[in-house]
Amino acid sequence: MSKNSKPLILVVEDERDLITLLSYNLEKEDFRVIGVETAASGMAKAESERPDLVILDWMLPDMSGLELCRLLRKSNLVHNTPVIMLTARSEEADKVRGLNAGADDYVPKPFSPAELVARIRAVLRRSSGKQAAETLEHGDLFMDIVSHRVTRAGGELHLGPTEFRLLRHFLQNPGRVYSREQLLEHVWGNDIHVEARTVDVHIRRLRKSLGTPDPIRTVRAAGYALDTGSKEDMMEG
């Protein structure tokens, strides 16, 4: 979280009136807000200001919000920053596209400011939970929880915050099978508006980042596990 005690929210939205509305409601809830109207300025502000969370509109004048989200995830400076997509697109396929691009949550327009604030607090809570001073290892995978760094075979991996928490959970419980519902409970918490299908989206993104061989095992009709090659893989969490 940013050095100031109030969390900093970066709003990337091309409607100036909506930036004003969001700023008013978020500042009333004790957040600091920076608002910009283009993807280019959003990327620059994200890397210079290091916000605690980015609210990102899907439709921007110079670049798709999806593409900007992908760029944020590739940035060495802000790849762990949580992103909430804010968009008039409400179809399930669009939601999946947003999650695949690296978003942590998705809020369709029109929205309730109170609901958005609740979503922001939920995402921040999930992303900045207290972390023990420890490291985790499994085969050629190494995770430093304090510095939020993950390497595999010596090469650094750039994971989004949700994928980081998923991998941490698997590393802490190697071989144990968790259903989608159990992963939602352990990784996402009891926050509302998170569907079981969301787990599959983030598992795919985690697998893509980890590369081959794939250490995440799918257990038919049961869930997912970090493969250990032992009988423990068949234990259900």
Image (cartoon, helix red, strand yellow):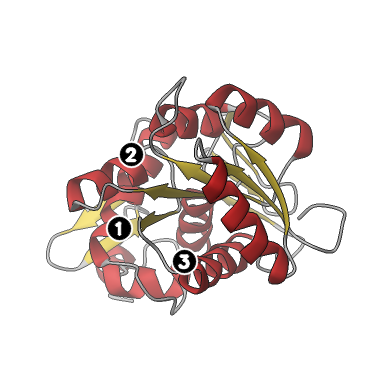
Query: Which mark is in front, 3 or 1?
Result: 1
Q: Residue furthest bottom?
A: 190
Residue 112 visible? The answer is: yes
Sequence-wise first label, 3 or 2: 3
Tell me the CA gap for discs 1 and 2: 20 Å
Q: Amino acid at mark 2?
A: Asp
Sequence-wise first label, 1 or 2: 1
Residue 42, x across and y down, in percent? 61, 31
Q: Quadrant of residue 79?
A: top right
Q: Quadrant of residue 136?
A: bottom right
**Tag 2 residue:** 214
Residue 221, x across and y down, in percent? 12, 66
Per the rendering, the mark at residue 23 is: none
Q: Secondary structure at mark 2?
A: loop
Q: Quick one: quadrant of the N terminus?
A: bottom right
Residue 179 visible? The answer is: no
User: Looking at the image, which residue is at 24% across and 44% down?
Assistant: 94
Q: Amino acid at mark 3?
A: Asn
**Tag 1 residue:** 198
Q: Are marks 3 and 2 in contact (CB under 8 Å)?
A: no
**Tag 3 residue:** 173
User: Looking at the image, which residue is at 47% across and 35% down?
Assistant: 69
Sequence-wise first label, 3 or 1: 3
**Mark 2 packing: few (<14 Cα in 10 Å), some, or many (20+)?**
few
Report the side of 32 relative to 141 (left or right).
Answer: right
**Mark 3 packing: few (<14 Cα in 10 Å), some, or many (20+)?**
some
Q: Residue furthest left?
A: 221
Q: Are marks 3 and 1 in contact (CB under 8 Å)?
A: no
